[in-house]
């Protein structure tokens, strides 16, 4: 979570507990971090996430640009899924071949 703060990716300032100085993350902070983790897990570059976050900070007028960033990322993820599906089909075919050979012995 600190990483996201240092990278300037939080949508709001993270508060601290007055007694001990521990960071206090709201439910909104946690939901935002989960979204960021999903973007990263699907291969969105940090620079694009930073751009998205900066646009978010600029307000509602940036919604079309944010939407475009997400649509571009969605297209990349869908293309990656197609590639992975094809790889899986080849692996599955190879397994079937080995199983058929093994049962013929």
Image (tube, rainbow, N blue to C red):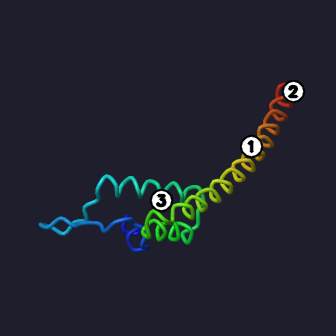
Compare marks 2 and 1 and give the one earlier in the sequence. 1
Residue 82 x, y percent position in the rendering = 74, 47
Judge from the rendering whether residue 67 lies leftward or rightward of residue 94; answer left or right.
left
| Circle nearer the viewer, 2 or 3 | 3
In the displayed structure, 86 sits above or below 2; it is: above
Q: Which residue is mark 3?
A: 36
The answer to which of 99 and 22 lies nearer the viewer is 22
Disc 1, SS = helix
Q: Position of residue 67 (x, y in %)?
A: 57, 58
Q: Position of residue 49 (x, y in %)?
A: 52, 66
Task: Pick the residue in front: 1 or 10.
Answer: 10
Mark nearer the N terminus (1 vs 3): 3
| Residue that appears at 42% across and 73% down | 8
* Residues at marks 2 and 1, CA–CA distance in whole angstroms: 26 Å
Residue position marked by numbered label 2 in the rendering: 105
Position of 98 with respect to 64 (left or right) is right
- Residue 65 in percent (x, y) is at 57, 64
Real-space Cα separation, disc 1 to disc 3, in angstroms: 27 Å
């Amino acid at each position: 979570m600190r990483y996201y703060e240092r990278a300037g990716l939080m949508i709001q300032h993270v508060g601290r507990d007055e007694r001990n100085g521990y960071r206090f993350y709201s439910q909104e902070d946690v939901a935002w971090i989960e979204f960021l983790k999903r973007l990263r897990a699907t291969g969105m570059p940090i620079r694009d996430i930073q751009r998205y976050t900066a646009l978010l900070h600029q307000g509602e007028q940036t919604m079309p640009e944010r939407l475009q960033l997400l649509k571009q990322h969605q297209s990349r993820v869908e293309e990656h899924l197609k590639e992975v599906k094809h790889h899986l089909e080849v692996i599955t075919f190879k397994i079937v071949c080995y199983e058929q050979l093994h049962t013929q012995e």
